[in-house]
């Protein structure tokens, strides 16, 4: 008990009162301490859990190439639309390749071949679409049907 008193330097009155209460009922004092330890332990586990969560999230982002911009070049057969631009602007795929188009803008976009040989249709902001590359080798310029100033080229060979 004397150890407890020495250790608690912060609020002598409060701690003293608590200590007195504990002294009057040792069983309740022990129960109270266990409950306190359980709460502290739970808080610690929660904190560690959150920290680990952040760590793994950071790790997975890093694994994908360390940034949103890198994702577009790391994922195969994927075109990422961001800031009203296609990335990569020119992509080469095998005939008939299935291509995923990710729209990271808020605005809706399409990926529409100028010669209409492929078209994702409207992809809402934050959504993704799919389209299949033509089976005939060639160079296919494409645009966004809603924003024709957005251009890209799909090369099939
Ligand atoms: Cu668009």
Image (cartoon, rainbow, N blue to C red):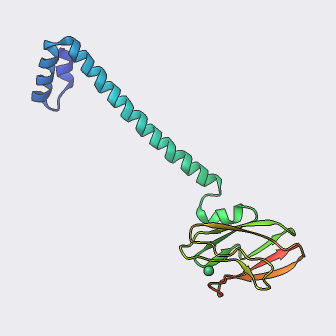
Q: From the image, which quarter does the C terminus lie in?
A: bottom right
Position above or below: 113 against 63: below
Q: Position of residue 61 (x, y in %)?
A: 59, 54
Is 102 on the left or on the right of 90, as rendered? left
Is 151 on the left or on the right of 115, as rendered? left
Q: Residue at x 37, y 29 (%)?
A: 41
Q: Position of residue 125 (x, y in %)?
A: 56, 71
Image quarter for ligand 1 equals bottom right
Is 32 on the left or on the right of 147, as rendered? left
Q: Position of residue 126 (x, y in %)?
A: 57, 67
Q: Residue at x 52, y 46 (%)?
A: 55
Q: Position of residue 113 (x, y in %)?
A: 76, 81
Q: From the image, which quarter does the N terminus lie in?
A: top left
Position above or below: 32 against 48: above
Of residues 116 and 66, the one drawn nearer to the viewer in this rendering:
116
Q: Residue furthest front?
A: 121
Q: Residue at x 67, y 82 (%)?
A: 144
Label tally = 0
Quadrant in the picture for residue 97: bottom right
Is 132 on the left or on the right of 57, as rendered? right
Position above or below: 45 against 56: above
Q: Residue at x 70, y 61 (%)?
A: 74
Q: Residue furthest bottom?
A: 149
Quadrant in the picture for residue 133: bottom right
Quadrant in the picture for residue 32: top left
């Amino acid at each position: 008990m004397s150890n407890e008193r020495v250790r608690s330097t912060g609020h002598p009155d409060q701690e003293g009162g608590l200590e007195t209460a504990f002294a009057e009922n040792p069983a309740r004092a022990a129960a109270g301490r266990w409950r306190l330890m359980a709460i502290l332990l739970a808080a610690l586990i929660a904190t560690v859990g959150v920290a680990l969560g952040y760590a793994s999230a950071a790790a997975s982002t890093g694994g994908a190439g360390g940034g949103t911009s890198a994702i577009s070049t790391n994922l195969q057969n994927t075109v990422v639309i961001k800031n009203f631009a296609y990335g990569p602007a020119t992509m080469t795929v095998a005939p008939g390749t299935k291509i995923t188009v990710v729209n990271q803008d808020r605005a809706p976009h399409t990926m529409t071949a100028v010669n209409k040989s492929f078209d994702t249709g409207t992809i809402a902001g934050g959504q993704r679409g799919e389209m299949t590359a033509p089976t005939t080798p060639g160079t296919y310029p494409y645009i966004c049907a809603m924003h024709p100033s957005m251009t890209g080229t799909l090369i099939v060979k």
